[in-house]
Image (cartoon, rainbow, N blue to C red):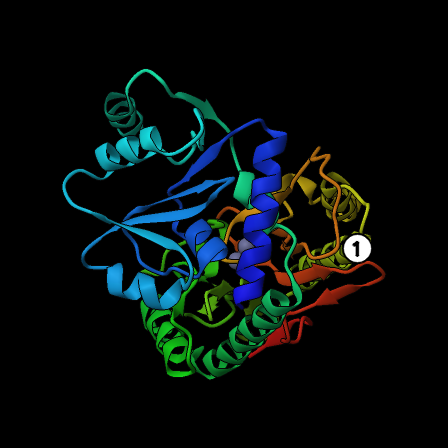
Amino acid sequence: MKTAFHQRRRALVARLRESQLDSLLITSHANWYYLTGFTGDAGALVASRRGITLITDGRFTVQAREETPGIEIVLQKGSLFELVGQFLKKSAGKRVGFDPTQLTVAQLQSLRKAGGGGLSYTPITGAVEALRMRKDASELAQMRRAAILAGEVFSAALPLLKPGIREFEVGAEIEYQMRKRGASGPAFETIVAFGERGALPHARPTAKRLRKNELVVLDLGVILGHYCSDMTRTVHVGRASERIRTWYRAVLEAQRAAIAAVKSGVSCGTVDAAARQVLAGYHLDNLFVHSTGHGLGLEVHEDPRVARGQTKLLEPGNVITIEPGIYAEGIGGIRIEDDVVVHADRTEVLTRAPRDLIEL
Ligand code: ZN
Ligand code: ZN
């Protein structure tokens, strides 16, 4: 793993040079892990052409030494951003990049105050995130395991779906099963939506009891070895009506079409359009109220966005979700979501769970 961290840091330095920056202040925990292996949750990382420095407090220094061999560690005493400002002032280079989507205005003010007038701060969004989009072989191996585990947890949850059970009971059991099978936790709060509650794409589990002849939407993902999975299945309790069957077929066809459109060199917008076009053929596109998918990795929502009009071209190593859905107020929702890897010459679906309509 040490070599992977090295390679990533080298790639980041090349990016800094292109952006004419001397250093980059990194405050995202996922980016810390990606570049160094550090899993603590307090401090700051400064990457410069000379090397990388982790500034963290006494709670994390022993851990940091173990997790990040070869990295300079500065012990923080007092205010973090004052110390970071002083450190930047002392270290070579005047042009400091920061991510405006991650650093607060107050933090930037502290830096400016401590660093004095000699430094210039330049906003640069997503410098590390751009590298994270291209997963290497070891990351893909981890994501395969995370996706398989999510599928196993889904299968374990199916027998619970009997009339009378409450949404939060199913949600709790799913998250318990994740941890029991080795996940460090859910990648996001598990969505369990019965009946008409499925019309809310991000329904939180409630005390609602399952009834016969209802749709059930389960959207779940694990964090395993730092990497996330994310999958959705919709099942029907009892025999589904003709209308539900048609809707389900439409969503499944839309998902298949979008997965078929995933190829290196194809734009994310084209993939999104493939799903939307199928639903339009069923006159259901007006019920598809979100984008087709998103990048996945150390975080559950990463670049690239698989949404309408996105011109970003897919590249080998990208991992994205494909998750079209339709939402009918008062009736329910149907969504099917899989995790997909872009390779140079093929597309790999990581999620292992049946996609045909399950009637319980
Ligand atoms: Zn999901
Ligand atoms: Zn998702």
Residue placed under numbered mark 1 in the picture: 257
Query: In the image, is residue 348 above or below residue 268?
Result: below
Relative placement, left or right, of 264 versus 216 is right
From what the image shows, is residue 59 above or below residue 55?
A: below
- Residue 92 position (above or below residue 128): above
Does the Cβ of the disc 1 residue fall within 8 Å of ligand 2? no
Between 116 and 211, the residue placed more toward the observer is 116
Q: Where is residue 222 in the image (x, y as percent from the top left)?
A: 46, 68
Tell me which corner region of the image, top left, top right, bottom left or bottom right, holds residue 251: bottom right
Residue, far top: 117
In-front residue for pair 109/247:
109
Please say whether residue 299 is visible from this viewpoint: no
Q: Where is residue 239 in the image (x, y as percent from the top left)?
A: 60, 74
Residue occupying image coordinates x 78% and y 48%: 278
Q: Label 1 amino acid? A: Ala
Q: Is residue 17 visible?
A: yes
Query: Please, what secondary structure does the residue beneath circle 1 have?
Result: helix
Picture coordinates of residue 13 (x, y %)? Answer: 57, 41
Q: Position of residue 14 (x, y in %)?
A: 62, 40
- The residue at 18%/56% (across/down) is 58
Instruction: Say if 64 sits above or below 281 in the image.
Output: below
Q: Which residue is drawn at 44% across and 61% down?
A: 37
